[in-house]
Amino acid sequence: MKIQTFTVGETCLAQIHRNPKVVIMDQMLNRSSHDAANGLAIIAKIKQSSTDTNIILLSAQTELDVFVKALSLYGCTYMLKDQLAFGKVERVIKSIY
């Protein structure tokens, strides 16, 4: 399994042709680059070209709107970024593989 990291979603989109099995996305990944898209916008674009990619939205966002969109529109796994998050992400990834 090869792991790649990207600082903004647009860079991830440029590599989506590699058909990743899993993408872990942060809703506020555009915080350091204000002209970059937020996590849900990138997820929508990923799902347009790579419908089989499993997406985990890992975020400190507690807004119900973000959670509902991630699940209902894009079929993502949503995880609140807290002390247990990385263990939960690991379990989800193991279940995918």
Image: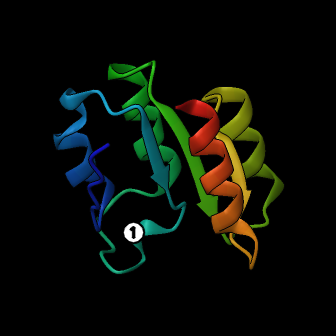
Image quadrant where residue 94 sits: top right
Amino acid at pointer 1: Asn
Q: Nearer the viewer, residue 74 or 53?
A: 53
State the residue at coordinates (42%, 77%): 31
Tell me where residue 2 appears, x and y as whole percent. 26, 47
Tell me where residue 40 appears, x and y as whole percent. 53, 47
Q: Is residue 86 above or below residue 46?
A: below
Kindly state the secondary structure of the residue where label 1 is placed.
Answer: helix
Q: Is residue 38 above or below residue 44?
A: below
Give the quadrant of the N terminus. top left
Q: Nearer the viewer, residue 20 or 42?
A: 20
Q: Which residue is mark 1?
A: 30
Q: Nearer the viewer, residue 24 or 29?
A: 24
Image quadrant where residue 96 sits: top right
Classify mark 1: residues with Cα within 10 Å, few (<14), some (14-19) or many (20+).
Answer: some
Give the residue at the far right of this rendering: 64
State the residue at coordinates (25%, 42%): 13
Tell me where residue 71 appears, x and y as whole percent. 72, 35
Query: Would residue 56 appear left or right of 37 to someone viewing this image?
Result: right
Q: Is residue 53 above or below residue 79?
A: above
Q: Nearer the viewer, residue 50 or 65?
A: 50
